[in-house]
Amino acid sequence: MIDSAKIELRNLSIKDYKELKISMMESYGSLANEYWSEQEIKTLIKKFPEGQFCIIIDEKIAGCALSIIVDYNKYDDNHTYEKITGGENFSTHTKNGDVLYGIDVFIHPEYRGMRLGRRLYEARKELCEQLNLKSIIFGGRIPNYSDYAEELTPKQYIEKVKIKEIHDPVLSFQLSNDFHVKKVIKGYLAGDHESKEFATLMEWNNIYYTKPDKLIHTQKTVVRLGLVQWQMRLFKNFDALVSQIEFFVDAVSDYQSDFILFPELFNAPLMADYNHLNEAEAIRSLASYTDKLLETFVDFAITYNINIITGSMPQIIGEHMYNVGYLCRRDGSYERYEKLHITPAEGSAWGMKGGSKLQTMDTDCGKIGVLICYDVEFPEASRILADEGMNILFVPFMTDTQNGYSRVRLCAQSRAVENECYVAIAGSVGNLPKVNNMDIQYAQSAVFTPSDFSFPVNGIKAEATPNTESTLLVDVDLDLLKELHAFGSVRNLTDRRLDLYSLKKKKP
């Protein structure tokens, strides 16, 4: 007999994995080789820590219940386990969903008969109520059905279990815990021979659920992007440059854009006053305008109610010079991003240093990422951002020749496909005859998409006329990305072989 004082119900931690693996292998029986990997458990805890429960007895894991939150409107009742879990990558989890979806429950054989499963189910119900979710749903195995498959249909078998003529260790327990059978699904869990690959779609309704009111500041799903294809021209002074910036912000905001993107080093015309200096000294002089420009952009973001991605500007920190930009949110907050990879010419001519800040940024339109020009040619950087939940990648760039532009464009299109996200690129056009190392510019700004049925067949949402000053206004639908993650013809994020390779960001 086990002293109940030693039973602890708590949230699962990645530190529990060693004991969890032992418990899983002893609990799964014929499916013992199908236990969750450490990476899968780590991903699940990272995405939804409060949804993972375990019961500890004498420092051993006696039982466990794993779950995610899904927007059930995106799935019909005939879904498979693989689809609802995003290929067990949990890309289907969303905090904006309405259903707590159970993906696993098990009790170690040594501790069965102690009603521990009931404790786990009650914990799920309490969480469902706390999060104001509509219901708990999961696909339940019917492992004893294989003994009756020749004489009973799944429906007949379920009816006999309900009236207790037949005992099924899974279904009987679920029915006793206030769950009802919503539907019978064929082919739900591949390889479940005991259930003949049938499953009961089980549901528990939260009677305290209240449909959320439509709020003013709910996150948008259709997002409008404004891209500035900036004409490099000489300006009389700093105020003239600011006037040109405001012209574009004003124009794009008139179309209710959520974002405006400026190119890399768009303020280079101000170096004309320093053309008598060598290139390194001239760009360091340009850096003296960066703080003033940041103040200007923050003011414009608030005044025109638009999120501004400032392209990039040189900034001196200590003895070193970096290529940086800012996300200026329309609520007045701002955040800096940095160019990580410096081209050989930037290093030799300007003495630029590569930054070290790589992270997604939160906005009222979801998570975004920014990579400056050359950075987009390194797939690792955008993959890390995608793993952090990025939906839109912005790429401010500056290229002098069509060769350089093609590198940026082709890599940006690749990033959209492999990371299942939108990629917006914006560059400068024109000439600056009085600024060394900035003589000519070539650009064609564009927005790229993944390549699947819900998107343009060529993966190009829109593109500007090459080498002409203009703005590009584009709507992108974030819900299409969610559907792609779950139901795409191919799923580049889900289908990665994490058992063979992995990518992680080093701690600063």
Image (cartoon, rainbow, N blue to C red):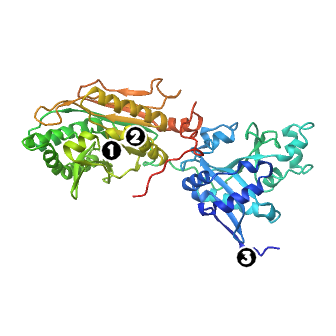
Q: Which residue is mark 1?
A: 341
User: Disc 1 versus disc 3: distance between alpha carbons?
Assistant: 57 Å
Q: Earlier in the sequence, mark 1 or mark 3?
A: 3
Q: In the visual, does 225 lie left or right of 92?
A: left
Q: Which residue is mark 3?
A: 5
Looking at the rendered structure, the number of numbered marks drawn on it comes to 3
Position of the C terminus by quadrant: bottom left
x%, y% of residue 166?
91, 49
Tag 2: amino acid = Phe
Q: Residue at x 72, y 72 (%)?
A: 58
Q: Which residue is mark 2?
A: 378
Q: Earlier in the sequence, mark 2 or mark 3?
A: 3
Q: What numbered label is drawn on residue 243?
A: none
x%, y% of residue 481?
50, 37
- Are the two marked residues, 2 and 3, in contact with CB atoms closer than 8 angstroms? no
Query: Vertical placement of 214 versus 64: above or below?
Result: above
Query: Vertical placement of 352 versus 16: above or below?
Result: above
User: Disc 2 versus disc 1: distance between alpha carbons?
Assistant: 9 Å
Position of the N terminus by quadrant: bottom right
x%, y% of residue 31?
76, 48
